[in-house]
């Protein structure tokens, strides 16, 4: 049941790593807007999504009021890449060890003790782990474009790379 999701995680993690490798260390504090995360914070958040969400999905519920949603500022691109590799391994271990019963068991998201939603655990992995990762990877690719860093191939060609040429 979870094998297709595990394969997708591995494939997408390799793509995400290619994008993260482009993050210039000299621009970690750069922001496109005062309300935005910095490049370093966004990259670190993206790098740690698989492991962080896997740890949340191990539980039966999570209360958002207990969370700190402010990503830390990494000191280097190497720190981001190391965090990504560690995060992906943690997610692979969690997803690979899920039984069908645990995957389909309900998981609750609360805020200050009040239920926001309940979904099967596999739904958390699909929406909050994978889809969330894709969202922030797209956001990071825009940050890279704005600072004139060549954007790698994600799906098909980019304006900077063409695997079909």
Image (tube, grey):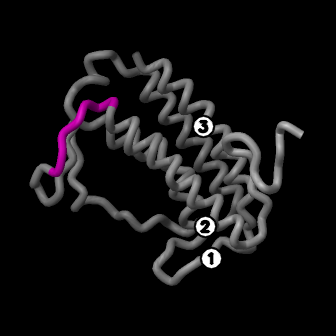
Residue 19 tag number: none
The boundaries of the magenta stretch are 116-122
x, y percent for residue 51:
47, 42
What residue is rendered at 37% in x and 63% in y?
Answer: 69
What residue is rendered at 89% in x and 40% in y?
Answer: 165
Q: Are marks 2 and 3 in contact (CB under 8 Å)?
A: no
Q: Are marks 3 and 1 in contact (CB under 8 Å)?
A: no
**Looking at the image, which residue sits at the far bottom?**
34
**Between marks 3 and 1, how big is the CA–CA gap?**
26 Å
Q: Are marks 1 and 2 in contact (CB under 8 Å)?
A: yes
* Depth check, front residue: 49 or 151: 151
- Mark 3 highlights which residue? 12
Residue 29 tag number: 1
Tally the numbered discs.
3
* Depth check, front residue: 75 or 32: 32
x, y percent for residue 119:
23, 36
Q: State yes or no: residue 10 in magenta.
A: no
**Image vertical order of residue 106 relative to residue 112, above or below:** above
- Mark 2 highlights which residue? 40
Front of the two marks 3 and 1: 3
* Depth check, front residue: 42 or 83: 42
* Depth check, front residue: 29 or 156: 156
């Amino acid at each position: 049941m979870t094998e297709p999701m595990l394969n997708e995680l591995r494939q997408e993690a390799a793509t995400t790593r290619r994008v993260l490798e482009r993050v210039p260390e000299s621009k970690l504090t750069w922001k496109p807007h005062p309300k935005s995360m910095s490049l370093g914070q966004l990259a670190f958040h993206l790098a740690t999504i698989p492991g962080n969400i896997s740890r949340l999905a191990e539980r039966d519920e999570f209360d958002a009021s207990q969370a700190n949603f402010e990503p830390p500022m990494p000191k280097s691109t190497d720190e981001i890449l190391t965090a990504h590799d560690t995060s992906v391994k943690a997610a692979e271990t969690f997803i690979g060890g899920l039984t069908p019963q645990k995957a389909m068991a309900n998981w609750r998201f609360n805020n200050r003790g009040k239920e926001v939603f309940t979904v099967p655990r596999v739904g958390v992995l699909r929406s909050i782990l994978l889809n969330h990762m894709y969202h922030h990877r797209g956001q990071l690719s825009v940050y890279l474009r704005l600072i004139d860093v060549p954007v790698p191939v994600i799906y098909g060609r980019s304006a900077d790379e063409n695997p079909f040429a």
